[in-house]
Image (cartoon, helix red, strand yellow):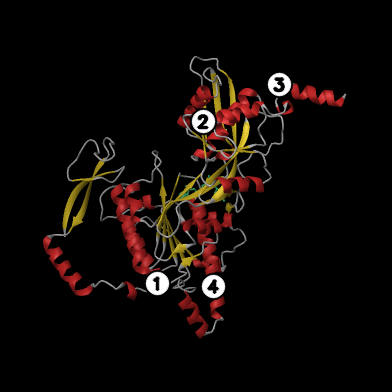
Amino acid sequence: MKSKVSFVCQECGYDSPQWLGKCPECGMWNSLKEISHFVETSRDKQNSIGNINKNITPKRLSEIKFERKQRLLTGFSELDTVLGGGIVKGSAVLLAGDPGIGKSTLLLQLALNLASTSSQKTQNTQHIRKSDNQKLRQSGLLSFPSVPNVLYISGEESEEQVKLRADRINPSARSGSKTHSNLLLLSNTNTDLVCGIIVKVKPMLVIIDSIQTMESENVSGLSGSVGQVRYSAFQFIKIAKTFGIPIIMVGHVTKEGMVAGPMVLSHMVDTVLFLEGEKFTATRILRSLKNRFGPVDEVGIFAMEGVGVKELNSPEQLFLSKHNDKTISGSILSVTMEGTRAFLIEIQALVLSSKIPIPRRVASGIDYKRLELLLAVLQKHCNIPLSGMDVFVNVIGGIKLSDPATDLAICLAIISSFKNINLSQKVGIGEVGLLGELRKASSLEKRIKDARKLGFRDIISSDKFKTLKQVVNSLSNDPPSLKLRKGHASKLEKEAEGN
Ligand code: TYD
Ligand code: MG
């Protein structure tokens, strides 16, 4: 073995033999840091080539045994779905997200769930006869309990802090309970030491919180640098594969919205999960960005509460503001798809004449450029004079939309506010093209069905209209009672009714 020095970009992991001011891969300035690592000399290689020839032979496909049901259920059905049906034995999962979003809380709860079910499992299995036990083992149901422990490695918090959090989440579980004795905590940041402990304990699941705090003396650089993160992740993944112990690693995202050393970690692990949400709303969305053992378009919805995270199993109406004012303008519903799930969402817009030369356009929950584009389409193809107007668009519930099928609803919310028409009980589904045409949304039938199921019958989509202009014209043909005339028309109407 010989030590070798190379320069690695801290942003993208690009490896260069000499120092460069600018990374040729990602274009970042001053991001290359010196890292020394060991390389095999030609003699090492010769030895290892000999070893490979002696010990390792390829297997026939027919010889490889495939055990089913080797998945750990997490106790959160939402999380299980996102993972593709539970945690696969020997898999490495990266859970990424903003600091403070709830990664540690979610994982601690997962650990507590597993520790409590594993204590039940061991209790139950004591009564199972030996033959039954064998059957269960063959069916894969008992493929995990080497020792029914969950090992939680915290590099960020002390053991007392984690315990405090566990008490907050699950105040009923006493210190002496099985759950608590099955959950092993370790506050340490030394990768090599932690690896040794995992091998010794052989738990059913390991949680590393977080991978950026882990460091090793075998690699130069501070903890959190690409070299350290890459080394630590590699060591943990090696253990996961060798001993069949699943490992979940927490990764914080940097300012750029990537996991630190993202290129390095995301191709090393089997599954990349992303926990997202606004800090000041309780809703958290868990997505899988990569999954070797399941679909990548599933999402899980959670809510952050005072006593930990709760999963929301029927969140279809979560993103509505639930006002019942039938006279309000500037609000419309739409249906967005997240994976195979449809969510009803509310889009609000406020349009008013601007007092400044360049009017303001503020978009929250949708892409700002998308808003500009839709405003241009409205102006050009529907003759709506928006160039002197301030336009604000907001999606209720802190959800971020990238689904183009919500274009129509965004346009209609703007028209609703501009023309003072009430559309709040309508649902708009469709993509708007640059020529003002209405395109069919993906899985339109499912979206319509789900909206109907929740009681919304007035659905505007590409089924009925071909262009945005047709939609706008149809709105002006609505009975006048739906329109709000200038001033306090509705109030006057009510007064007239009273008389
Ligand atoms: P945490 O899991 O520490 O975030 P991360 O590990 O992603 O950095 O979550 C921290 C936030 O969650 C903190 O602002 C407090 C809040 N929280 C709750 O709302 N309820 C709880 O039960 C817990 C433990 C934390
Ligand atoms: Mg944390």
Q: Position of residue 418 (x, y in %)?
A: 61, 23
Task: State which tag comes first along the sequence, 4 or 1.
Answer: 1
Q: Which residue is mark 4?
A: 121
Q: Amino acid at mark 4?
A: Lys
Residue at 26% over, 71% down:
58
Q: Any atom of ligand 1 within 8 Å of the CB at mark 1?
A: no
Which residue of the protein is positioned furthest toward the right in this rendering? 499
Residue at 38% over, 46% down:
259
- Distance from the alpha carbon under mark 2 to that under mark 3: 27 Å
Q: Which residue is mark 3?
A: 485
Q: Which residue is mark 1?
A: 66
Q: Amino acid at mark 3?
A: Arg
- Distance from the alpha carbon under mark 2 to that under mark 4: 51 Å
Judging from the image, what secondary structure is the residue with disc 2 in?
Answer: strand
* 379 over 251 or under it: above or below: above
Q: Position of residue 57 (x, y in %)?
A: 24, 73
Instruction: Using the image as rendered, state which of residue 245 and residue 295 is in the foreground.
Output: 295
